[in-house]
Image: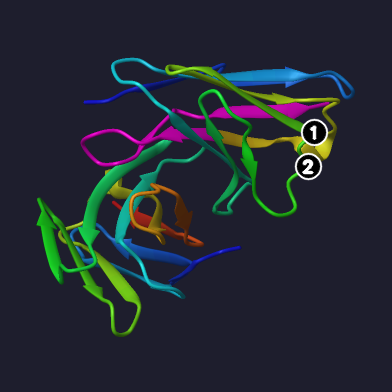
Amino acid sequence: GAVVSQHPSWVICKSGTSVKIECRSLDFQATTMFWYRQFPKQSLMLMATSNEGSKATYEQGVEKDKFLINHASLTLSTLTVTSAHPEDSSFYICSAPDSDYGYTFGSGTRLTVV
Amino acid sequence: SQQGEEDPQALSIQEGENATMNCSYKTSINNLQWYRQNSGRGLVHLILIRSNEREKHSGRLRVTLDTSKKSSSLLITASRAADTASYFCATEITSGTYKYIFGTGTRLKVLA
């Protein structure tokens, strides 16, 4: 089946630094990628939708300048958390439409900002 | 905003018992999916039910959908300790967008 590879699985960074999370569709082309974040014991909240070759669409309340999304190719979308702070610590997951289920998830990235 | 509300928020049962989780949503949907998430990990797709379907089965899983009540249920029969996880419903609210909104989730604990 379709696979979305997400890296890194976990990352610890210092407050004020930036962190990049990558999601690659391995055996299909992902013209769209969805980015979610999840706080402990909570549900997934949609942050933004990235589209290959165009600007991402952000959900209400999500800071565009804080969470930079780039979708430069049909197989790669990246989320950069800029000037990370402890409150950005969370679990970030990407997903992309595929032909089987309509939706394949990455394995997630646990970000801890210290 | 959260589209789906799930209940119960947490459920603890003995191995071998059945577990039922419910999901209610607010707007019309194209389809609804159920996912499982083991602690701190990614999501595993369980089952998709389309808006014109009322019931689907997959192994020990049974999903129902009542569009008139805007609700769905997930039944896990003969539960096992390995079923311990969080379960989420996700609704596609506009056809063909693949934009899914997740419910609040149910934390299931199956005691051996």
Query: Which residue is located at x 83 percent, y 35 percent?
Result: A86
In this rendered view, identify the residue nearer to me: B60 or A107.
A107
In this rendered view, identify the residue nearer to me: A5 or B9.
A5
User: Colour mode?
Assistant: rainbow
Residue B22 position within the rendered picture, expressed as x and y whole percent measured from the top left:
35, 72
Position of A74 relative to A112 (above/below): above
> Split into 4 quadrants, where in the image is the N terminus of chain B?
bottom right
Have a look at marks 1 and 2 and say if they share a chain. yes
Query: Which residue is located at x 18 percent, y 59 percent?
Result: B16
Badge 2: how crowded within 10 Å, few (<14), some, or many (20+)? few
The disc label shown at residue A66, or none: 1
Q: Are marks 1 and 2 in contact (CB under 8 Å)?
A: yes
Evaluate whether residue A1 shows in this view: yes
Q: Is residue A107 magenta?
A: yes
Q: What is the chain letter for disc 1?
A: A
Say which quarter of the image contains residue A64: top right
Say which quarter of the image contains residue A17: top right
Count up the numbered dots: 2
Query: Which residue is located at x 34 percent, y 40 percent?
Result: A103
The disc label shown at residue B53, or none: none
Badge 1: how crowded within 10 Å, few (<14), some, or many (20+)? some
In this rendered view, identify the residue nearer to me: B24 or B42.
B24
Residue A8 position within the rendered picture, expressed as x and y whole percent measured from the top left:
57, 16
Position of B103 relative to A30 (above/below): below
User: Mark 2 falls on what kind of element?
Assistant: loop
The amino acid beneath tag 2 is: Glu
| Residue that carries the numbered disc 2 in the rendered image | A63
Going by the image, does B17 lie left or right of A40? left
| Residues shaded magenta | A93-114
Q: Is residue A22 magenta?
A: no
Say which quarter of the image contains residue A67: top right
Position of B101 relative to A32 (above/below): below
